[in-house]
Amino acid sequence: AQSVTQLGSHVSVSEGALVLLRCNYSSSVPPYLFWYVQYPNQGLQLLLKYTSAATLVKGINGFEAEFKKSETSFHLTKPSAHMSDAAEYFCAVRSGNQFYFGTGTSLTVIP
Amino acid sequence: SAVISQKPSRDICQRGTSLTIQCQVDSQVTMMFWYRQQPGQSLTLIATANQGSEATYESGFVIDKFPISRPNLTFSTLTVSNMSPEDSSIYLCSVEFAGSLQETQYFGPGTRLLVL
């Protein structure tokens, strides 16, 4: 069975500081991994995805994530947080046609 | 990607009534999905809606409660029947294009439902 664990339901960072949102997955086959962002009162927007190409994936808005098979991780990072990054972030793994979502991490950016 | 719209964007309903949510895509897609996102929680897949066949429901969801239509390749509806306050959630449709298994699901803006 596939599963996704997001460590930390709430993360607070200062504006300009590094953003690190953690995601670990469980998959019996090479995974397809995704990060989505949900801004208040909106749907989910794709940030980036890993599909067994380069292990370091760059996404929109300056975010990137690194696939580490040995650690079964796909952590999301951004070097410098911006106020507009405040949102809910979801990690997801694909198995067949199904997506399995983590429980989400709420990011707060402190001015 | 695709432009996905949902109607209504939000609604407040009385218990015992039903609400039909529409999902429209600006291009033809093979697979459409309906998710529920309860307050403060992650997404749970309700069903997969394929054109020309019955929807496939996930464990815990039944057709009588959440009937789905998929009349063509750009449109689907989800009905929340005989609503109770526990049905208060965000309902999201997502779409996927035919082709590689690496394809992504793209989400609509969601329908925010409050049942009183």
Image (spheres, rainbow, N blue to C red):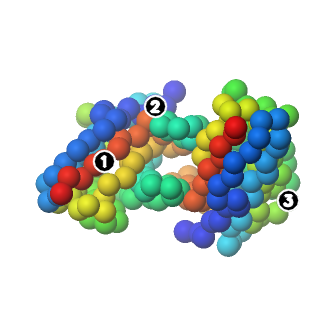
Q: Which residue is pictured at 65% across the width and 55% down the height?
A: B10
The quarter of the picture where residue B46 lies is top right
Chain for numbered disc 1: A
Residue at image location 83% in from the left, 41% down from the top: B17
The amino acid marked with disc number 2 is: Ser
User: Which label sits on residue B71?
Assistant: 3
Q: Residue at x 62, y 50 (%)?
A: B112
Q: Callout 1, which amino acid?
A: Leu
Residue B48 is situated, as x and y percent measured from the top left of the image, at 71, 45
Q: CA distance from mark 1 to mark 3?
A: 39 Å
The residue tagged 1 is A107
Q: Is residue B89 above or below residue B50?
A: above
Measure how far apart labels 3 and 2 are at the Cα level. Answer: 33 Å
Q: Are marks 1 and 3 in contact (CB under 8 Å)?
A: no
Circle 3 chain: B
**Circle 2 sits on which residue?**
A3
Residue A35 against residue A99 in the figure, above or below? below
- Specify whether residue B43 is in view: yes
Question: What secondary structure is found at the residue carrying circle 2?
Answer: strand
Quadrant showing the N terminus of chain B: bottom right
Q: Position of residue B63 (x, y in %)?
A: 82, 36
| Between marks 1 and 2 in the image, the one whose residue lies nearer the viewer | 1
Looking at the rendered structure, whether the residues under marks 1 and 3 are on a common chain is answered as no
Q: Which of labels 1 and 3 is toward the front?
A: 1
Residue B40 image position (x, y, % from top left): 47, 37
Label 1 or label 2, whichever comes before in sequence order:
2
Crowding at mark 1 (Cα within 10 Å: few <14, some 14-19, many 20+): many
